[in-house]
């Protein structure tokens, strides 16, 4: 990482820091821990799953509504740093607080989980927007991709540590129950997140913004309204957001429903966790590769490549029969997952007016969050109608094809375009 500046390195390290939350709390250990806690308390399995889904939907909806407003306020000079730290500390401290909630208090677990999600995703709105502050347009693809790659690598270390801890408790090698080991895993996540965010606090500062004015909240709503009025000036940005809405919906659905899909194929919890670990490991070098290739062939071409790989994934899902097939599918996902997310972030960052970066990344996160609704509903509906999960996954081809087509109408952002001109 010698060729990167201190600010770029520190920004990338936040991906390393917060990705532990993504895999341990969002994807792997917390859902299993919560389900076990709720069912032991007498909650029916279907109801436990539904309550978790409602919790995620509520927190998603809250952030989707607040994102552009908070982003607009944060565009005033000095405010981005405050908002990032505020949401970061909410997320990290509430994650650590999961340690103190007994497994019998499943409802309190959900409430605290909601707070962790708000903190985690809220901080990400401002973290993504910092990309315009830490690097220039020509380096955004590589810096963003490097961040995602470090995130995959960084998540593996605490994840493995937590798996070892839980496994040792299951085998009764250490005097801890599985529930206690799971709660310690949440503390490990919080500490990892906090420690590796310290460079971000020290070396990354808001560089672009508008001058602060009296009545900052009222003024922010005025600016937000003005952006909607000037939407034609930002045509390229909003066409891209429409394309992003569809293809990232497919990406997010495959990530969020992979565990359920694997269960339908007969994979055990330990096999699923091992598969998730393998995806994290394989995704890291491919995220690096996407960033490098984007510099050679252009960001849009690499986004098309990622979408095309996901279309193959959806088609291949139709022919899945064995565990080996599931692993082939998982590796295909790993090859595109980090790259398509990283390059979407950098492609968007290359187009946004720098002084409005937070506001526009608020919209970016709205489209990403609300996109998490259509895909799961589509998979659920087709699966119910056909009785086959594979058909449900295949239906996601529709989302990727729409995203692919709409992306065609987004102007190319070349390395020579240092600043975005409205109406470009």
Image: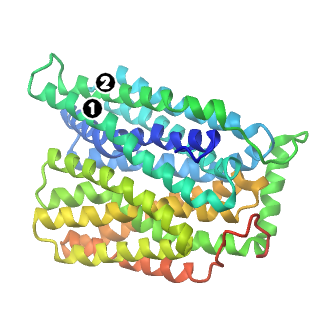
> Which image quarter holds the C terminus?
bottom right
- Image: 162 above or below 224: above
Horizontal side, residue 23 vs residue 89: left or right: left
Horizontal side, residue 423 vs residue 261: left or right: right
**Residue at 24% from the left image edge and 25% from the top image edge:** 181
Labels 2 and 1 touching (C-beta < 8 A) = yes
The spot of residue 70 in percent (x, y) is: 69, 46
* Location of mark 1 (residue): 162
The spot of residue 305 in percent (x, y) is: 43, 75
Which residue occupies the extreme right position in the image? 214
Q: Which structural element holds mark 1?
A: helix
Q: Label 2: few (<14), some or many (≥20) within 10 Å?
A: many
- Tell me the tag on residue 184: 2
The spot of residue 141 in percent (x, y) is: 57, 60
**Residue at 71% from the left image edge and 40% from the top image edge:** 80
Could you say which quadrant of the image residue 259 lies in?
Answer: bottom left
- Image: 8 above or below 90: below
Number of on-image labels: 2
Q: Rounded to the nearest whole Å, what is the CA distance between mark 2 and mark 1?
A: 8 Å
**Residue at 16% from the left image edge and 60% from the top image edge:** 264
The mark nearer the N terminus, 2 or 1, is: 1
């Amino acid at each position: 990482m010698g060729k990167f500046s201190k600010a770029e390195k520190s920004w990338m390290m936040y991906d390393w820091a917060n990705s532990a939350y993504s895999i341990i709390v969002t994807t792997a250990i917390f859902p299993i821990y919560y389900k076990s806690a709720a069912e032991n308390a007498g909650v029916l399995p279907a109801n436990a799953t539904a309550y978790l889904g409602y919790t995620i939907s509520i927190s998603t909806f809250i952030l989707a509504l607040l994102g552009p407003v908070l982003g607009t306020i944060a565009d005033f000079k000095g405010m981005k740093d405050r908002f990032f730290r505020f949401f970061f500390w909410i997320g990290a401290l509430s994650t650590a607080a999961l340690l103190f909630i007994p497994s019998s208090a499943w409802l309190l677990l959900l409430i605290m989980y909601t707070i962790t999600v708000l903190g985690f995703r809220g901080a990400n709105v401002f973290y993504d927007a910092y990309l315009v502050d830490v690097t220039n347009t020509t380096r955004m693809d590589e810096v963003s991709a490097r961040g995602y790659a470090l995130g995959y690598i960084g998540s593996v270390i605490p994840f493995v540590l937590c798996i070892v801890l839980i496994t040792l408790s299951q085998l009764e090698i250490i005097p801890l129950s599985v529930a206690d080991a799971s709660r310690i895993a949440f503390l490990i996540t919080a500490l990892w997140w906090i420690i590796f965010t310290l460079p971000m606090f020290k070396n990354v500062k808001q560089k672009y913004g508008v001058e602060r004015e009296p009545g900052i909240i009222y003024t922010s709503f005025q600016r937000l309204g003005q952006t909607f009025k000037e939407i034609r000036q930002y045509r390229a940005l909003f066409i891209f957001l429409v394309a992003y809405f569809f293809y990232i919906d497919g990406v997010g659905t495959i990530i969020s429903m992979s565990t359920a899909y694997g269960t339908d194929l007969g994979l055990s919890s330990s096999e699923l966790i091992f598969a998730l670990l393998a995806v994290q490991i394989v995704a890291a070098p491919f995220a690096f590769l996407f960033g490098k290739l984007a510099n050679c062939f252009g960001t849009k071409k690499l986004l098309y490549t990622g979408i095309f790989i996901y279309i193959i994934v959806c088609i291949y899902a139709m022919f899945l029969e064995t565990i080996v097939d599931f692993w082939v599918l998982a590796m295909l996902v790993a090859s595109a997952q980090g790259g398509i997310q990283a390059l979407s972030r950098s492609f968007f960052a290359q187009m946004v007016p720098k002084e409005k970066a937070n506001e526009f990344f608020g919209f970016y996160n709205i489209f990403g969050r609300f996109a998490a609704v259509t895909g799961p509903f589509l998979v659920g509906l087709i699966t119910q109608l056909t009785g086959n999960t594979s058909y449900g996954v295949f239906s996601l081809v529709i989302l990727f094809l729409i995203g692919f087509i709409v992306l065609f109408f987004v102007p190319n952002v070349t390395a020579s375009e240092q600043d975005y001109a409205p109406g470009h």
